[in-house]
Amino acid sequence: MAEKNVVVIGAGVAGLTTALLLSKIPGYRIVVAAKHMPGDYDIEYASPWAGANYMPVSLRGTDAAEWDRKTWEVFNKLALNCPESGIHFQVEDCEIRNRSKDVGSATADWFSELLSSSPWFKDVVPNFRTLSKEELGPGIDSAINFTSVCINTAIYLPWLVSKCLENKVIFKRAVFRHISEASSLNIHPAGSVDLVINCTGLMASKLGGVEDKSVVAARGQIVVVRNEVGKMVNLSGTDDGDEEACYIMARAAGGGTVIGGSYQKGNWESQPDPNLAVRIMKRAVQACPELTGGKGIEALDVVRYGVGLRPVREGGTRIEKEKVGDLWVVHNYGAGGAGYQSSYGCAEAAVRLVRAALDVQTKL
Ligand code: FAD
């Protein structure tokens, strides 16, 4: 059977994971074309800014929960067997702390499954347990604990590129105004393109032929520090307003500790807000004094202040196929704050749609 020519638009975690899974199946010549590539830091490119960790916020019984469940299987194997991917288990476990007073806040709603004492993933992640009353810190009403992973995105994204290159995927810089340009601008060496996979994240809201206005930015501000604690902590809310969050995670392989954060919907501001940065650092040191050995935020050794925009889509990640004019398109965008933890499940679903659209009978 003749090979099928595919262009993946986007080199974030969605585009790279989808290209990698498709490249493992014979019969496809794949080009990944994107404005931003691993190594770039830009407000239109969410993936480098993520923590990134595995803390499912998907609701029980949904497709999203299934995507997260499948992704854990892969992350677990990578953390166990593949240190060069930049994924590691936290030295200590991941602790989710719940304050009753946060009920109904934007952050607590976002984390609702995570804050449940019996979330769907309790049998998926290792060592899940509910903390006893005696183990809770001041102001905390309940908490769960489990083993999780943290991804050093500065290692993981280039690692995905390397795995794709091993499978002969071609990478190109390109900027598209309309999705059809991916098949018409001489992007693919074959000249013709059978299918385009749209992994443009937040920019799906602006790309011609897609212009999905249900994708909005949820601004996340972070601080990367050299201080280490080896554990992951997440709070149900903060006393600094509905749009702010408090989390701490230690990246693999010298990636430092990421402290956050915020969840500011509709806000595209690319520059870090210095006042918010101070609040983020204060909350992190309060939640985890061992970060600076009890010495306060002055003892935080800052690597970088950063801002990324989560591509949040009303109704969840769009994984669908459709014809745009004569062109087959498979969409995989809009993962919000879950682009890593759902990446393999979403990519697998997208690959299934590619095969259905092109009627390729190869077994996955
Ligand atoms: P992106 O990474 O934004 O990539 C989009 C790609 O499309 C880019 O290559 C871009 O150049 C390209 N593109 C777009 N439009 C065009 C065009 N017109 N022409 C050419 N190329 C185009 N997720 C987790 O799972 N765990 C976490 O702990 C976590 N923490 C986060 C913390 C922060 C602060 C932020 C901001 C996000 C976090 N996320 C986390 C969410 C995660 O980062 C995103 O869901 C994920 O990165 C989205 O990936 P993507 O590939 O869809 O989009």
Image (spheres, helix red, strand yellow):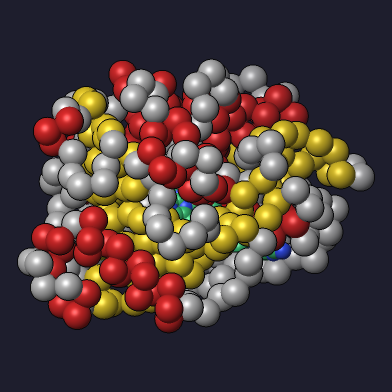
Farthest residue to the left: give it.
293
Q: Work out whether 97 lies above or below 7.
A: above
Vertical side of 108 occupied by 363: above or below: above
280, 360: nearer the viewer: 280
Q: Residue at x 35, y 67 (%)?
A: 280
In x, y percent, where is residue 89?
Answer: 21, 42
Residue 45 rendering spot, x and y as whole percentages: 55, 64
Figure quadrant of residue 321: top right
Q: Is residue 195 left or right of residue 284?
A: right
x 78%, y 59%: residue? 207
Q: Quadrant of ligand 1?
A: bottom right
Q: Is residue 155 left or right of residue 230?
A: right
Q: Is residue 84 left or right of residue 33?
A: left
At x 80% / y 66%, what residue is drawn? 177
Above/below status of 361 relative to 311: above
**Horizontal side of residue 275 vs 89, given as left or right:** right
